[in-house]
Amino acid sequence: MNETQPAGTEAGDRDAALAALYDDVHRGHMFPFWATSTDVAHDEIRQLMGSRGAVPYLWRYEDEIGPLLRRSAELVTMADSERRSLILVNPGLAPTRATVSTMYTAYRLNDPNEVMPPHRHSPNAIRLGLTGTMNFTGVEGEDIVFGPGDMVLTPQDTWHNHGNKGDEPAVNLSVLDLPLVEVLNAIYFEHDYKEDRDGREVGVKEQSARFSPDYSAEVYGSGGLMPCFVPHGRGSGVGSPMYVYRWEPMRAMLDAHRDRDGDPYEALMIEYVDPTRGSPVFRTMTFYAQMLRPGEKTRALRQTASLLVSPLEGRGHSIVGETRFDWRPFDTLAVPGGAWCRHVNDSETEPAILFVASDKPALAALGHFRKWGRDGTGDTLRLV
């Protein structure tokens, strides 16, 4: 008898008993955390290797997303649904609504002069203008009209509504931390918005304005200068009180620094921050604008944070793992945490600008954010 064989069992008997054990464990919705040298149907190596995970993937706006949005606008009216958005579902995570493990991107087309009723929810969200100059989001009494490149926040638990105040269709892109909040079992949506009318709470279809349309810029738009005569805890108080970040000053800042060396792994990258704390706009997600100068190539970077990359200007390509993805404006590229990634601006004359969403704040808060890079010789360096 083999020295490792349990007393009183033959090899065939043991294999049958082991298979029965694994079947019973599996049937009981449990996981066997041990290793054996016997190939069985439900061993833990098979289960671990079979776990789902986000994969690198590129969604194309011009060829895929845009045409589908236009078809949906023809067929689905506000009477059918107040939400007409396309959520990008990562093939490695389907059918879960997730573009990477903790975030999803959605594209929304609003027809002229349509505005949905107010609602609020536990996930944090941003809207980024892509087309049209009259995209609309009202957030806690600040009516914000925005255009291409403008980023609007809807922090968790803030009443807001979306739409289009113009006479032409408008498209915006959303990023939400909904997959993370869903894993935490903390999802909720509320649609019963009410306002005081002569001492009575009355349901209304649109929020009344309590702030000027340019309040965010008026109060927070001068870097390094903070008004002390206004409260800064608007809404739920857990996100940046600056609800709109205009594209023009961000673009100007990128241009102002385009002759600097930049970072070999991230080129010229500028983070959107909460002006009252200098921290990311949300505790779960952060956002960047990233410029690749003409012909610029970044070195390979790997990090535990997952990224959603949406080009706003220019054309280029990214290598994620071993796969090349050629991108154009308004595409979205999913870069799962742990994947090596580098970007290339294919133009020798024009810059490429990327809008980047990252779940770095959530990972950093839990002590799990790490970053590695490859140097000029191909060696791996621990960066963070």
Image: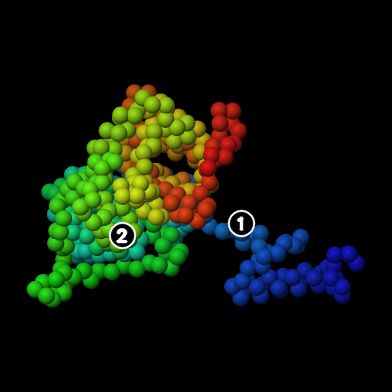
Which residue is the site of mark 1? 49
Q: Quadrant of residue 31?
A: bottom right
How far apart marks 1 and 2 lie (CA) works out to 41 Å
Report the label total.
2
Q: Which callout, 1 or 2, points to the residue nearer the camera?
A: 2
Left or right, 177 with reference to 232: right
Q: Are marks 1 and 2 in contact (CB under 8 Å)?
A: no
Q: Secondary structure at mark 2?
A: loop
SS at circle 1: helix
Residue, x 14% and y 49% (percent of image)? 166
Q: Is residue 150 in sight in this rendering?
A: no
- Above or below, comparing residue 358 to residue 263 in the picture: below
Q: Which residue is mark 2?
A: 237
State the residue in front, 75 or 189. 189
Is 130 positioned to the left or the right of 335 in the image? Answer: left
Q: Residue at x 19, y 46 (%)?
A: 218
Residue 159 x/y as whole percent: 24, 63
Position of 325 with respect to 13 (left or right) is left
Residue at figure coordinates x 29%, y 41% from the top left: 224
Q: Which amino acid type is marked by label 1?
A: Met
Q: In the image, which disc is placed on residue 165?
A: none
For residue 131, above or below residue 315: below
